[in-house]
Image (cartoon, rainbow, N blue to C red):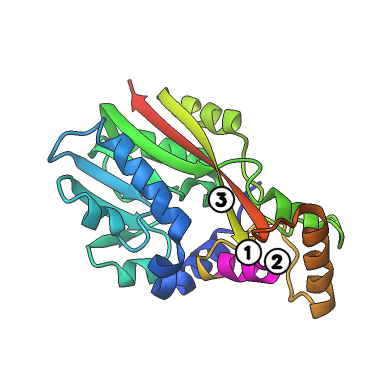
Amino acid sequence: MRMFDTQAVKEAFGRAAPVYDREAQLQKRVRGRCIALAEQCWPVGARILDAGCGTGQLAREAPHWHITGCDLAYGMCRVSSSPVINANVEALPFADESFDGIFSSLMLQWAGDPEAAWREMARMIKPGGRCVIATLADGTLGELREAFAVLDAAPHVSDFLPAHAVLTQAGHAGLTLLAAEQAQVVEYYPDAIALMRSLQAIGASNKAAARRRGMMTLRQLSRVDRAYERQFGQAQGLPATWQVLYLVLEKV
C-alpha cells in the first residue's frame, strides 16, 4: 500500500513552484544543514544527484560540485535556473553507479513507495559513495493532527515514518549509516488557517493516499482552530513542530 498519492504530490508541488523559494523558509534552513554535512563527504568536482531538487537551489549554493537535479513536479523543473530532469525518484533514468553522492533534502518523506526510492538511490551511487539525506519523521505537525481529531478519525495530516523505520529501509537498500541526528523545529502561526495556508503554499498539505477528499466547511475549520488554541496555544501563537531527520549513509 502506498503511503502518499504520487499524482497529488506532483500537482501540489508544481502549483507551489512560483512562490516556493519565498515561502519555504524551513526548507532553506534544512538544506543549509545538509550542505554543511555534505561538505564533509564530497570533494570539489564530485558528481552529485540532487534528488527532489525543487527549484534547483543546491546547484546555485554549491557550484563546486557537478550537480544533476531531478524532481517529480514539472512546475519545479520549469522554474529552476539550472538544468533538471523531470522524474520520479522511485524510477530514475540513470545508469547504475552514475554518481559519487546523492543529496536529498525534504523529498524522501513524500515518496509513495519509500523503499523503492531507497533502492534507486543505492543503485545509482558508486561503491564508497555517500548519501546526505534530510527527511521528516514521525511527530511532525503533531499539534495539527490532534486538533483535527475533534472532527473525526480521518487522516487530515500526513503521517511520516519513525526514524527507526527510515533507517531500516536504508539498510535493506544496501546503505550503511555513518551519522544521524534528529532536530525539532517549531514555527508559530496566528491561527490554524494560517498554518494550513502556509503548508498549501509550499505544496506540503495532506497527500496521504487514504485522505478524505473534499473541501472543509468554515464551521469545521473553526472547530479545528478552537481545539488547536485550547490544546497548544502559546503567547507566540500556535506552534507547529517539525521533526527533521538528518542522515549520512555510505554504499559499501
Q: Is residue 186 above or below residue 193?
A: above
* Residue for badge 3: 112
Q: Position of residue 246 (x, y in %)?
A: 45, 36
Which span of residues is magenta-colored? Answer: 189-200
Mark 1: secondary structure: strand
Would residue 128 be found to the left or right of residue 174 on screen?
left
User: Does residue 137 show up?
Assistant: yes
Q: Where is residue 158 in the image (x, y as percent from the top left)?
A: 65, 54
Q: Quadrant of the C terminus?
A: top left
Verify CB contact (< 8 Å) between mark 3 and mark 2.
no
* Residue for badge 1: 189
The mark nearer the N terminus, 3 or 2, is: 3
Verify CB contact (< 8 Å) between mark 2 and mark 1.
yes
Q: In this view, does 214 lie above or below 247?
A: below
Give, as a three-letter code, the residue at label 2.
Ala
* Residue for badge 2: 192
- Nearest to the observer: residue 244 or residue 110: 244
For the point 64% across and 59% down, the residue is 236
Would residue 72 be found to the left or right of residue 83 on screen?
right
- Nearest to the observer: residue 3 or residue 237: 237
For residue 98, which quarter of the picture?
top left
User: Does residue 91 show up?
Assistant: no
Q: Where is residue 185 in the image (x, y as percent from the top left)?
A: 55, 46
The mark nearer the N terminus, 1 or 3, is: 3
Mark 2: secondary structure: helix
Q: How crowded is mark 1: few (under 14 residues within 10 Å), some or many (20 or more)?
A: some
Of badges 1 and 3, the one in the foreground is: 1
Mark 3: secondary structure: loop
Give, as a three-letter code, the residue at label 1.
Tyr
- Nearest to the observer: residue 48 or residue 95: 48
Give, as a three-letter code, the residue at label 3.
Gly
